[in-house]
Amino acid sequence: MLRKMDVVMKSKKRKAISLFSGAGGMDIGIRQAGFSILAEIEFDEHCCATLMANAERQHSETRVYHADIRTIEPADLLEDLQLEKGQLDLLFGGPPCQSFSLAGKQLGLSDERGPLLFEIVRFAKTIEPKVILLEQVKGLLSSKGCEGRRGEVFEKLLSELEGINYTPKWRVILAADYGVPQLRERLFVIATRGRNGFIFPERTHAPVEECNGLFQYKPYVGIGEVITGLGKPAPKIQGKTIYERPDSHVDVTPERDRERIAQVPEGSYLAAQTHLGEELRRGLSPKDTTKYLRLHRKRPANTLRCGEIFYHPTEDRYLTPREYMRIHGYPDDYILKGPIRSRTGSVRNLDQHRQVANSVPPPLAKVLGQQIKRFLDEQNI
């Protein structure tokens, strides 16, 4: 009889709440891992439109809260969701990373977005989830705090988690190691109540030269495997920031940029084309090895960026939002809402390329979610 009850418990849907949900990349993977997401909280209006459109399409009962997370009381959220303290299986999210990014000014807690990192601790203190999953840039590991010490902010985060009876573990994970065609490194923190017996999943993929040894790794996935079959992208309407096309396969390349893109070989970058004039090279130095990059079909992409869109490997244009989604691992039936920014334009809040680049690749989130669910099931909690 007890064994049958155990089977019933392990087959049930685990419950989760998503903070800083963005376009829902991490949420997709967590759902695929067997969790039911009760609520998604996001401040950006375009991301909220994306979340709501997909919840409606999937007939999901997930509640989307368009709000500044600092204005939400966790106790009110519990009441709204009809949850008791300690019932939630997973609280997860990826707070804004610009304050800690090595590519930015690294203002840490001095940036108004920096303290948002600790909102997940505030929520956890009241909700008491069984597991916390946090995603951040690896720059958090060295971010300076009020005393000016490297790593001080991360130490503070770990201390605050421990102060509410959670034991954290962390690892910097390369998305390509788990089958995502992208060399994206991010820090993941997983904290459990009391003792932490969680074990991070082992990598499944590796560079081709490492695939012939004792470990049976699969070779890294090149972007050519994932961006094919989409057909010709629709042209961007001149002067428009929003183009409603369900698949988001829209070409944002200004005509004057095509000549410049045509001069860059597959897998190379604009600054390396020293035979070109200054006007075409935009004054770049040979050190600018990651700017204006043309991706290579047989290799994973560099980390998708928010400000710069990479060149298509064989066509003289920028990648479309849908190609970004393919590289990130989004399902083809997932809808993006909001503006598609022109290459040289700007829009209010997040455009579609940025929504994808800011998110966690769904396949990586799924792997972590499955490992968390396995941990919860084995602990029978």
Image (spheres, helix red, strand yellow):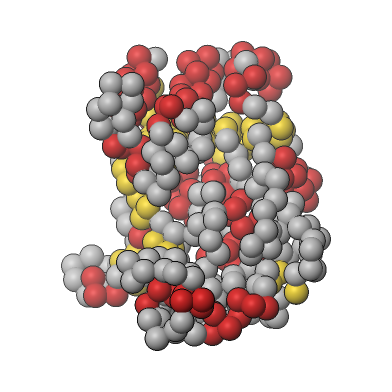
Q: Which residue is drawn at 37% across and 66% down?
A: 288
Figure disc tally: 0
Furthest residue toward left: 214
The picture quadrant where one finds residue 353 is bottom right
Q: Which of 197 and 187 is in front in this view?
A: 187
Q: Residue at x 47, y 41 (%)?
A: 98
Residue 124 visible in image: no
Q: In this view, does 157 lie above or below 320?
A: above
Q: Is residue 18 above or below residue 253?
A: above
Residue 350 visible in image: yes
Furthest residue toward front: 278
Name the spot of residue 158 as percent of width and height, x first: 33, 25
Q: Is residue 231 above or below residue 143?
A: below
Q: Residue at x 53, y 73 (%)?
A: 311
Q: In this view, does 186 lie above or below 203?
A: above
Q: Nearer the viewer, residue 370 or 72?
A: 72
Name the spot of residue 26 as percent of width and height, x first: 54, 46
Name the spot of residue 207 as percent of width and height, x first: 30, 70
Q: In which quarter of the image is the C terminus?
A: top left
The picture quadrant where one finds residue 155 is top left
